[in-house]
Amino acid sequence: MKKNINVVGAVIFNDNKILCAQRGAGKSLPLFWEFPGGKIEKGEKPEEALQREIEEEMHCTIDVGEKVEYTVHEYDFGIVHLTTYYCKLINGKPVLTEHAAIKWLTPNELPSLEWAPADIPAIEKIAKVYA
């Protein structure tokens, strides 16, 4: 039986562009694009996990806003439960520590990247909202 993995992703807006992060070559889902974030630890609220993950992985601070989407996607390594949130960059600039690359794209440019499957419903929703 596959394990459930609860994760959060940040749809970080800055100057009307959204931060996109490319997974490292040695990670699961290598070189796919995703919204940065990570696993929710026991006893953590999703919003707290998201702030912590962004501080740890990107060395910047965000303000977590409303939920974008909740997606369940089954991968070979487990069942990912991804909740994405609109976020605002409030301090610092994202730094590459765990990702291979980052890009700032407008909402209508998001479909140009090869996204991890769990992130695609959020991208579709953002594209409709900002069309």
Image: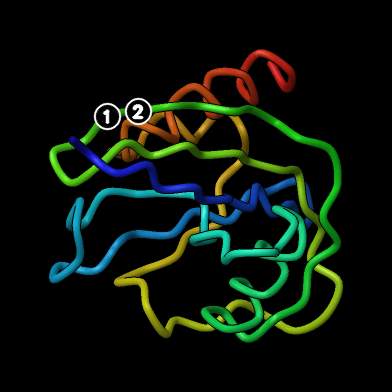
Q: Quadrant of the N terminus?
A: top left
Q: Residues within 10 Å of mark 1 (few under 14, many from 20)?
A: some
Q: Where is residue 24 in the image (x, y as percent from the top left)?
A: 24, 69
Q: On the picture, is 131 further left or further right than 113? A: right
Q: Where is residue 30 in the image (x, y as percent from the top left)?
A: 17, 57
Do residues under tags 1 and 2 come within 8 Å of each other at their CB atoms?
yes
* Three-letter code for the amino acid on which mark 2 is drawn: His
Q: Which residue is drawn at 30% across and 61% down?
A: 23
Which image quarter: residue 47?
A: bottom right
Q: Where is residue 76 in the image (x, y as percent from the top left)?
A: 13, 39
Q: How crowded is mark 2: few (under 14 residues within 10 Å), some or many (20 or more)?
A: some
Q: Position of residue 45 (x, y in %)?
A: 75, 56
Q: Is mark 1 on a helix, strand or loop?
A: strand
Residue nearest the observer in this picture, 111 or 5: 5
Which image quarter: residue 104?
A: bottom right
State the residue position of label 1. 74
Q: Which residue is drawn at 79% across and 67% down?
A: 62
State the residue position of label 2. 73
Residue sitting farthest toward the front: 1
Q: What element carries label 2?
A: strand
In this view, 90 is above or below 65:
below
Q: How is the image coloured?
A: rainbow
* Three-letter code for the amino acid on which mark 1 is drawn: Glu
Q: Residue at x 60, y 64 (%)?
A: 42
In this view, 53 is above or below 106:
below
Residue nearest the observer in this picture, 83 or 88: 83
Q: On the picture, is 80 further left or further right than 26? A: right
